[in-house]
Amino acid sequence: MMIVVKPYICSSCNDVVDVSVGKFGKIIPKTMLTESQKKEFNHCPDCDSQDLTEWDTKNHPCPKCGNKMEKSGPEYCWD
């Protein structure tokens, strides 16, 4: 539970990725990040791009296929 993640669409990967946006349950605003935190947060974990758009599951379709995302199966706590 150390890192807070939010789903974003990475324009470089064209995929939905979990992006680190905070620590210990608190989101750290971009304007409050230290230099070392800027390297750790708000970039794609796959390609390191910062060209990200916050993903809203209700209003944005899957960026790869364009279909609406559907919830299926049970949810698990992955920590």
Image: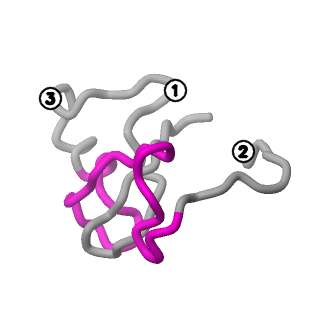
The residue depicted at 32 percent of the width and 64 percent of the height is: 10
Mark 1 / mark 2, whichever is N-terminal: 1
Q: Mark 2 points at which residue?
A: 79
The residue depicted at 44 percent of the width and 23 percent of the height is: 26
Q: Is residue 52 magenta?
A: yes
**Disc 2 and disc 3: Cα gap in Å?**
28 Å
Residue 65 lies, with reference to residue 5, above or below; the image says below
Q: Which of 65 and 28 is in front in this view?
A: 65
Q: In this view, does 53 lie to the left or right of 25?
A: left
Q: Which of 59 and 12 is in front in this view?
A: 59
Q: Position of residue 30 (x, y in %)?
A: 20, 34
**Marks 1 and 3: in contact by CB < 8 Å?**
no
Q: Mark 1 points at which residue?
A: 24
Quadrant showing the C terminus: top right
Residue kind at label 2, given as amino acid type = Asp
Q: How many marks?
A: 3
Q: Where is residue 32 in the image (x, y as percent from the top left)?
A: 19, 26
For label 3, the SS is helix
Q: Does the magenta stretch include residue 29?
A: no
Mark 1 crowdedness (10 Å alpha carbons): few <14, some 14-19, many ≥20: few
Q: Is residue 10 left or right of residue 16?
A: left
In the rendered structure, which segment of residues is drawn in magenta?
39-67
Q: Name the residue under label 3.
A: 31
**Disc 1 and disc 2: Cα gap in Å?**
13 Å
Q: Is residue 57 left or right of residue 73?
A: left
Q: Which of 69 and 16 is in front in this view?
A: 69
For label 1, the SS is loop
Mark 2 / mark 3, whichever is N-terminal: 3
Quadrant showing the N terminus: top right
